């Protein structure tokens, strides 16, 4: 199992980034796909029309999101997103643990190209 950790710079306030990551309609805007999301611990979520799904663990408004992502039987990955105020916007710290070795490259690429690139584009327009 592997771990992914990276900081992404986004030119928007932490509260705007948090809203984009937790508001169902905002998620659907920047992903272009159906989503299910509630900011209630214990609820299940789905992004990119089910390509990513799991359970919401913790929310600290405008600061932190913790989720459990499902990979298959007995293979869940813990994802923690922390938002830090940064000059020019937000530093988004992403940490994902317990990634199956064979899924690591796809996960790392997904954070860069799908998650960050789409989210960043939302705030550049």
Image: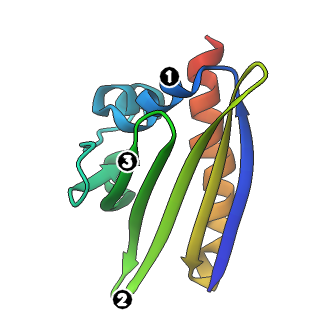
Q: Nearer the viewer, residue 11 or 28?
A: 11
Image depth: mark 2 or mark 1 in front:
1
**Percent of width and height locating residue 117:** 65, 35
How far apart are the alpha carbons under marks 2 and 1?
34 Å
Q: Secondary structure at mark 1?
A: helix
Q: Nearer the viewer, residue 70 or 7?
A: 7
Few, some or many residues within 10 Å of mark 2 (<14, 14–19, 20+) = few
Mark found first going from the N terminus, 3 or 2: 3
Q: Which mark is residue 59?
A: 3
Few, some or many residues within 10 Å of mark 1 (<14, 14–19, 20+) = some
Q: Residue at x 51, y 39 (%)?
A: 63
Q: Secondary structure at mark 3?
A: strand
**Percent of width and height locating residue 118:** 58, 33
Q: Residue at x 39, y 57 (%)?
A: 51
**Percent of width and height locating residue 49:** 32, 48
Q: Indicate left or right for 61 with 122 as reference.
A: left
Q: Residue at x 74, y 34 (%)?
A: 9
Contact between marks 3 and 1 (CB within 8 A): the answer is: no
**Quick check: 15 above or below 80?**
above
Mark found first going from the N terminus, 2 or 1: 1
How far apart are the alpha carbons under marks 3 and 2?
24 Å
Tag 1 residue: 16
**Percent of width and height locating residue 23:** 33, 31
Q: Indicate left or right for 3 with 48 as reference.
A: right
How far apart are the alpha carbons under marks 3 and 1?
15 Å
Q: Indicate left or right for 118 with 56 as reference.
A: right
Image depth: mark 3 or mark 1 in front:
3
């Amino acid at each position: 199992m592997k771990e992914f950790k990276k900081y992404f710079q986004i030119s928007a306030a932490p509260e705007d980034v948090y809203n984009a990551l937790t508001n169902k309609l905002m998620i659907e805007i920047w992903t272009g796909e159906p989503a299910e999301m509630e900011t209630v611990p214990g609820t299940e979520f789905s992004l990119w029309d089910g390509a990513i799904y799991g359970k919401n663990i913790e929310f600290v408004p405008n600061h932190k999101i913790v989720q459990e992502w499902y990979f298959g039987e007995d293979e869940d990955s813990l994802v923690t997103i922390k938002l830090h105020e940064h000059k020019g916007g937000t530093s988004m710290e992403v940490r994902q643990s317990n990634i199956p070795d064979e899924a690591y490259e796809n996960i790392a690429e997904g954070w860069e190209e799908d998650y960050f690139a789409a989210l960043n584009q939302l705030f550049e327009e």
